[in-house]
Image (cartoon, grey):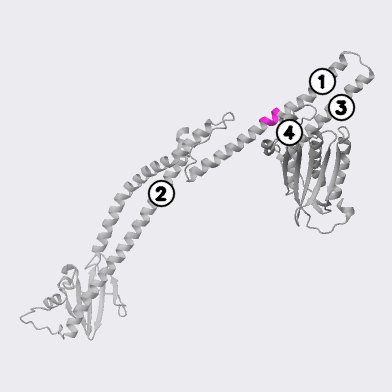
Amino acid sequence: MNKLKLFVSSTRFKATIWYSSLFLTLEILLGILIYVYLYNTLLDNLDIGLKSQAKAILNNVVEKHKDIENFVPDSVYSTPEDLIWDVIYNEVALNQRNNYIQINSKNKIVFMSANLEDDTLAFPQKIEPVNLFSFTDTTLSAKPIRCVKLIAGQYKIFVAFPIHQIIQTLTSLVHIFILLAPIFFIVSIIGGGIISAKSLSRIDAIIKKTEEITALNLDEKISGEKYSDEYGRLVKKMNEMISRIKTSVDYMNQFSISAAHELKTPLTILRGETEIALKSRKTPEEYIEVLKSNYEETLRLTKIIDNLFFISKIDNSLIDINKKPIYIDEFLKSISDNFKILGVEKGIDIDVQSSTNSLVDIDKELMTQAFSNLIDNAIKYGEEKSAVLIKAVVLNTDKIKISVINKGEGIPEDVIPKIFDRFYRVETSRNRKTGGVGLGLSVVKAIISWHDAEIFANSDLGNKITEFSIVIKKSQRNKFPLQQAV
C-alpha cells in the first residue's frame, strides 16, 4: 500500500497522467475541429452543386425560352423530366434520385422531379429573400434538406438535396473516432510512462548519488554537468552547492582545530605556571613574575576570544556600520599615538606622513580596529630599532591610499594571496612571542570591504620592506566642521 501511494505521488506517475490527459484533450479537440471542418466543407460543396444545377436549369428554361408550363413532346424530349435532366446532366454529380427539383411559374408548380412523386417541397413560411436555406420535410427525408432558390422572370427554380449522406459520413467519422480514442489513450499512457521514465531516470541517478555523498566524501561530484538541459544545470548547481558545503565544513573543521590549538596553548601555560607556583614557596618577586606571565596569557586569551567573537558576528551579519566623515590626518595621528608605547620595547618608532587632509566616510571604531591590527603586526614582525611608517597620499580626485610600512623579515610572494584567509599564518610566525590565531588580517579585510575599499599587500624580501595599502574613496562632503569630524 505504501509503495502504491509512493508511486501515485511520484513525478513519474503525475507526468504520465498529465501527458495522457493532454494527449487525449488534443485528440478530442482535433476530432471536433475535423468534424466541424468536414461538415462545413461538405455543406459548401453541396451548396455549390445545387447552385450550379439551378443555374443550368434557369439558363436553359429562360434564355432558350423553353416553355415548361405548356410542354409539347417532340422527337428529342418526350417528357419535361427528360428535358430537365438533359439540361443539368453535366452539372449533376450526385444520384438523380436524391436531387429534388421543382419549378414554379406564376405561383403554381409547373415541374417536379419524379422522385418527389405526389409530394411537393414544403418550404418554411419566409423564404422569399433567401436564395440558400435548409428545411425539414419528413416525407422526403429524415434529415434536413438543403435547397437553392433562383428567380428569373416568371420562373422560380428550386433544387434541393437531403444532407443525410453528409450526416452519414460524419457519423462514420465519429464512430471511427470513438473506436480509436481508447486505443490512442492507452498508447498515450504507455508512451507517457516510457517518456517520463526515460526522462526521469537521470533524476533517479542524481538522487542515488546524492544519498551516497556525506560529510566524509564531499570531494565527490554528481555526474551529468556536461548536459546543457535542465538536468545538467541542476547537477551543476548541486555540485556548486556541495563545493560550498565542503568549504564550510573545511572552515568549521579548521576553525575548531585552530581555535582549540590557540586556546590550549595559553591555557596550558597558565596551568603549568600556576601549578609550579603552588608546589613550592617562592619569593614575592617570583610570584610577581608568575602573575605577569599569567596576565600576558590572559590578554592573549582575551584577544583570541575577541577575534573569534568578531568573526562570528561577521558570519552572521551582526555588524552595524556607522559611517561618518572624518579627517584622515587626525585619524591616523590618533591611532599612531595609541601604539607608540607598544613599539618602545623593540625600539620601534611610529611615524605618520600625510600629504592630504581630506575627509573619508568611515566607521571610526571598526577602522581603528583594522589599523590597530595592521600596526600591531608591523611592530610584532618588524626589526628592532626600526620604524613603522603610516603614509597617506592622494591617488586621484576621489581616492586616497593609506599604507602601513615596516622593515622586517617580510612575506614570501607565494603566500601573499593567502594571508587574508582565516587561520592562515606564515610558518615563521608560529611561536609564542609573535604567533596569533591567524584571524587578524581576515578581520582587517572584512572591515575594509564593508567600507567599499580595497587592501593590498606587497613585500620586498631583498630590502626587507613590507607594505599593506588601503585604497579608499574620499567623502563627498567638501567641507566639514573640524570639531565634528574627529
Label 2 environment density (alpha carbons within 10 Å; few <14, some 14–19, many ≥20): some
The reply to whether callout 1 and callout 4 are in contact (CB within 8 Å) is no
Query: Dividing the picture into quarters, in which one does residue 409 lie?
Result: top right
Kindly identify the residue that appears in the image at 47 percent across and 43 percent down.
227
Where is residue 374? Give x, y as percent.
79, 39
Residue 21's mark?
2
Please name whichever residue, 378 or 172, is drawn nearer the observer in this view of the structure: 378
Main SS of the magenta part reads helix
- Name the front one of labels 1 and 4: 4
Residue kind at label 1, given as amino acid type: Arg
| Residue 461, placed above or below residue 332 | above
Is label 3 in a helix, a strand or a loop?
A: helix
Q: Which residues are magenta?
A: 253-257
- Name the front one of labels 3 and 2: 3
Residue 438's mark?
4
**Distance in Å between CA atoms under marks 1 and 2:** 77 Å
Residue kind at label 2, given as amino acid type: Ser
Instruction: State which tag comes first along the sequence, 3 or 2.
Output: 2
- Looking at the image, the residue that sits furthest to the front is 462
Label 3 environment density (alpha carbons within 10 Å; few <14, some 14–19, many ≥20): few
The reply to whether callout 2 and callout 4 are in contact (CB within 8 Å) is no
Magenta-drawn stretch contains 188: no
Residue kind at label 3, given as amino acid type: Tyr
Q: Which residue is mark 3?
A: 295
Instruction: State which tag comes first along the sequence, 1 or 4.
Output: 1
